[in-house]
Image (cartoon, rainbow, N blue to C red):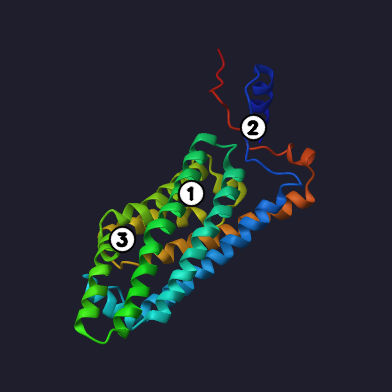
Amino acid sequence: MKLVNVLSKREEEMGVPKTMVDAVGPDGKWLYRVGGLSALVLGIAYIVIIALYIPIGAPPSGAEAWLTYLAGHTTAWWAILGLSVLTDFLFVPVALSLYLTLKGINRNAMLLATACVGLFVVLDLAITWTNYAALITLSGHYAAATNDTQRAVFVAAAIYPSAVLESGLLFVYNTLTLSVGILVTGFVMLIRNLQQEYGLFGSGHGHSWNCFSSWLLFCKFFECNHNHRFRAHYSLGLVCRLQTLQARSAVIPTAGRQRFPLYIPAQPVFDR
């Protein structure tokens, strides 16, 4: 503690800037609350998605196989799609809350992380779940078709969306972009031992395992369950910290918070 005080005093004398975890004032504490609640709903939604995935199994390959499979699980897949779209939107306030919290540590890294999460949201909504919605709708028409000609028409219409969902590039859209954003955020936390100093409970493991789950998905192991499981772990881990930050902003005045900064020297200080 004495060493920290000595270093901070010398930094003040030398004009070295101080960096600390940004803490919002009372006017901005609402973002912590929204971020924490969003992370809570996000984690619960992923748990429900996993529960829906398990009994119906992984989708097959081929346009006609997709339609046959989805026709037998229409209700479950509409529920999965609705929850997945909801989780995509919930990532926005979570990402903004993390940026607000950690931009004082490394602003550029947090800009990159937030951009990756935003890119994931846009691509996942525009590509992944749009094509799933098209296939689910076509599966209903396919099941209601009365002859082979009608069924052939719907199978032909399903070739494009099924090919998109079976493409290896989909991994980049719906997993890699988000995993990179979460991994960069985790590195920002770990660089300055932020987990120990500010108690981002559970987040470090969530960041690491979410990125690892991306490679599990890439290697075709446990296609959906691992990825959603680790995202749920990550989201629920953020709830405690974001709610704590919101409460701290409410009870600790701005002037008082400045007494407990996390000092990070911009350059080494040595005796000459």
Q: Amino acid at mark 2?
A: Val
Where is residue 43? Give x, y as percent.
Answer: 52, 66
Eyeballing the image, is 136 above or below 189?
A: below
Query: Which numbered dot is residue 163?
Result: none
As drawn, is 248 to the left or to the right of 44? right
In space, the residues marked 3 and 2 are separated at their CA atoms by 44 Å
- Which quarter of the figure has residue 225? bottom left
Residue that mark 1 sits on:
118
- The residue carrying mark 3 is 217
Image quadrant occupied by the C terminus = top right
Rendered location of residue 77, percent (x, y): 40, 75
Q: In the image, what residue occupies the spot 50% across and 63% down?
A: 87
Can residue 60 be seen?
Answer: no
Q: Residue at x 66, y 52 (%)?
A: 31
Position of 76 relative to 25 (above/below): below
| Residue 156 at x, y percent in the picture | 23, 69
Q: Is residue 258 above or below residue 235?
A: above
Determine whether label 2 and label 1 are within 8 Å by CB. Answer: no
- Give neighbour class at mark 1: few <14, some 14-19, many 20+ (Cα, 10 Å): many
Q: Residues within 10 Å of mark 2 (few under 14, many from 20)?
A: few
Amino acid of disc 1 = Gly
The answer to whether residue 29 shows anywhere in this view is: yes
The residue furthest bottom is 146
Camera-side residue of 157 and 8: 157
| Residue wearing tag 2 | 4
* Mark 3 secondary-structure assignment: helix
> Does 78 sit left or right of 63 as displayed?
right
Camera-near label (3 vs 2) is 3
